[in-house]
Amino acid sequence: MSFGPSPAGFGPAISPTWTPPTDIEQALFEAKSREDWPAYFGTLAQSRLFFEIQKDKADATPPATYAVFGHDPRVAGGRIWAVYTEGMLPAPEPHRVFDWNRLEWFTKVWRPTDPSMIVVNPGSPCEAFLPSAPPHSATWAQYGERAPARKRSLRLRTLRVGGPLHGSVAHGLACGALLCVSNGSFWNSMAWHGTGYPGERTRLREWWGITTREEWQYYLRDLLACEQHSSVWDFALGLRRTIARDFGGHVDTGYWRQAAGNLIRARSEGSIVVSEDGVTRTDPRPESEVEARVEGVQRLIGRITRYEARMRADGVLDENRYVSSVDAWDLGRASKMARWGLGARFGTLAEAESAVIQAGRTASHSYKSWQDFSAGYILGRCLHFDEEEFGDWYQDMVEAHRILMSDPGSPWLNIPFR
């Protein structure tokens, strides 16, 4: 079988010193070494293949995907359609953006006016040339059409090169590792493309209502300040910390509930405040409103203790330990929000990196270990989404926690929390 301008359809000779960025490029590299086409195309069929698109077309209403074609003097006519596996994407630039699709898609959308050659990872040791016009394209497209169903699975993915493995940036990136494991993204990808430019824009719009740079900056600031979760959660957990400090660590749940009710009622009785501006009087709150607040906080305390009991049973929390705060829920999302904003081109790489570092520093002041951080994140996520169903919102995080606390390559085992 022979495709493209070089032997067996492959590009330049393999460099013995080249380190493949991920297992995808490793598999392509090895298949290329053996000239094993089925293995090469089988790997491509299971991978996201990214290609450059016109940003203005993607930003239009309605949006559209228009590929940006490249040039390679080794190809007759010079025009090529360059595609990249995840580990080979170039660093994000403000006006250069990418989308992705599966192998078989490229044959379905190809038009006679398009380049006659697709080049996979151009210029790299795992490069390959694929004729894009039928009938030749059917030879490689069949691997995508026959590929087994792609099942979602939680796993730790690491960039071997192109992403930090140690230091303050890596520490901040590791704060978002639970979500990375859950979503199947590289935990240490600072130069973030994620699901591609259209996908990152859609993510922020549908989940956060973010459509502008200013909105992204607002949410990122709030997350870094740990102000994107309920203040009622902070009240309940802060009260327990105070009780634990005053009574030597152990906090009886009944006493915690009673103390919460007493404090809410005391704060609702009205007061007189004397300041330079004069005397300010606050009126007592209606009893029905106060008791409704007491009931709500006491119900929250019950939810917190039940989640903690389940987390102890599942090995997330050690025996007799409890969650000190849910700041991790905001900080873990801040680590990701910084990258999502970069992928959506609402921010620059420098801005995203600065925010990631800040998230890591704040986390190290708020918690003692990765395990403590993880428990805080999981509790916050569950209080927000799960409604005590202990469903995917909880189970996915427990599985991600176990992976991060056990995989030899985990940043949580290789980067000191403090």
Image (cartoon, helix red, strand yellow):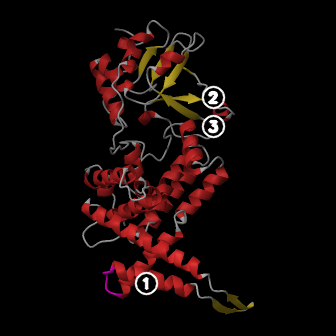
Q: Position of residue 313 (x, y in %)?
A: 25, 62
Asked if residue 46 is positioned above or below residue 246 in the image, the reply reads: above
Which residue corresponds to mark 1?
A: 259
Q: Secondary structure at mark 2?
A: loop
In three-dimensional space, the C-alpha distance between marks 3 and 1, rounded to whole angstroms, equals 56 Å
* 3D distance between C-alphas at marks 2 and 1: 57 Å
Residue for badge 2:
64
> Splitting the image into 4 quarters, where does residue 69 fall?
top right
Q: Is 127 situated left or right of 29 in this image? A: right
Front: mark 3 or 1: 1
Circle 3 Cα neighbour tier, 10 Å, few/some/many (<14 / 14–19 / ≥20): few
Mark 3 or 2: the one toward you = 2
Q: Is residue 387 visible to us here?
A: yes
**Residue 300 appears left or right of 203:** left
Tell me the quarter of the image containing the C terminus.
bottom left
Give the SS element for disc 3: loop
Image quadrant in which you'd find residue 240: bottom left
Q: Tell me how far mark 3 sits from mark 2, CA to CA.
A: 16 Å
Residue nearer the viewer, 191 or 302: 302
**Residue at horizontal 38%, vertical 15%?**
142
Q: Secondary structure at mark 1?
A: helix
Which residue is found at the position 41% from the left and 61% from the top?
377
Alpha-carbon neighbours of circle 1 within 10 Å: few (<14), some, or many (≥20)? Answer: some
Q: Are marks 2 and 1 in contact (CB under 8 Å)?
A: no
Cβ–Cβ under 8 Å for marks 3 and 1: no
Q: Which residue is mark 3?
A: 95
Residue 378 versus residue 366 in the image, above or below: above
In the picture, residue 175 is in which quadrant?
bottom left
Is residue 187 in view from this perspective? no
> From which residue to which does the magenta span run?
247-252
Work out whether mark 3 precedes mark 1 in sequence or the reverse, and give the earlier one.
3
The amino acid sitting under disc 2 is: Ala
